[in-house]
Amino acid sequence: PTQSSLEAWAMHAVSVSGLKHNPADALRQARSSPVVVLNRDHPDAVLIGLEQGGVLQAPGVRAALATALFRDGELSLARAARVAEMDVASFIAHLGRLGIPAIRLTAAEANADLDTLEQWLQSSSPTPAH
């Protein structure tokens, strides 16, 4: 490899404790080049800025990232829609096309919600005139 090709692969390193105490610095460095996270002098992870090389601007990348993070429970529906740069209704439709439920409830939670809805409907319906 030539000197210029090695410079293109410039990297930074941060210890786990350094990452804990100053995560903003590691994220700032990751925007321009990979940052290796060292755990007791052993490489443990690599932080790579998604802005490098226009990764986030490639078609479908934001939607795929948001979908995976939502599916895995890492992002709320509204936040995932923002990451995907969609309105919530469009993101729900996107999830539906992929067969991913937009609302995740257990059977007990769904039944409790139905009970609450029924109680609300009964309390808000007009009483018959006598």
Image (cartoon, grey):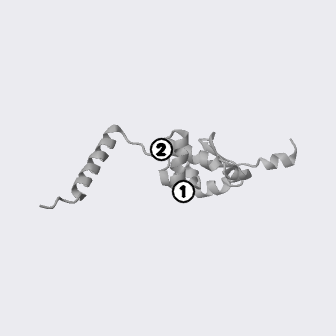
User: Where is mark 2, residue-wise?
Assistant: 73
In the rendered structure, the answer to whether residue 108 lies left or right of residue 1 reads left
User: Where is mark 1, residue-wise?
Assistant: 87
The picture quadrant where one finds residue 98 is: top right
Upstream in sequence: badge 2 or badge 1: 2
Calculate the distance from the C-alpha at mark 2 to the C-alpha at mark 1: 19 Å
Q: What element does badge 1 sit on?
A: loop
Measured as percent of width and height from the top left, residue 13 is found at 66, 48
Q: Residues within 10 Å of mark 1 (few under 14, many from 20)?
A: few
Residue 39 appears in the figure: yes
Measured as percent of width and height from the top left, residue 29 is found at 67, 55
Measured as percent of width and height from the top left, residue 127 is found at 18, 59
Instruction: Look at the picture and state if 26 lies above or below 105.
Output: below
The amino acid at mark 1 is Asp
- Residue under the image location 56 percent in, 48 percent down: 66
Residue 20 appears in the figure: no
Q: What element does badge 2 sit on?
A: loop
In the rendered structure, the answer to whether residue 130 lies left or right of residue 106 reads left
In the rendered image, the residue lying farthest to the right is: 2
Q: In front: mark 2 or mark 1?
A: 1
In the rendered image, the residue lying farthest to the front is: 130
Q: Total marks drawn?
A: 2
In the rendered structure, the answer to whether residue 111 lies left or right of residue 33 reads left
Measured as percent of width and height from the top left, residue 107 is found at 34, 38
State the residue in front, 81 or 72.
81
The picture quadrant where one finds residue 43 is: top right
The amino acid at mark 2 is Gly
State the residue in front, 53 or 7.
53
- Residue under the image location 26 percent in, 54 percent down: 121
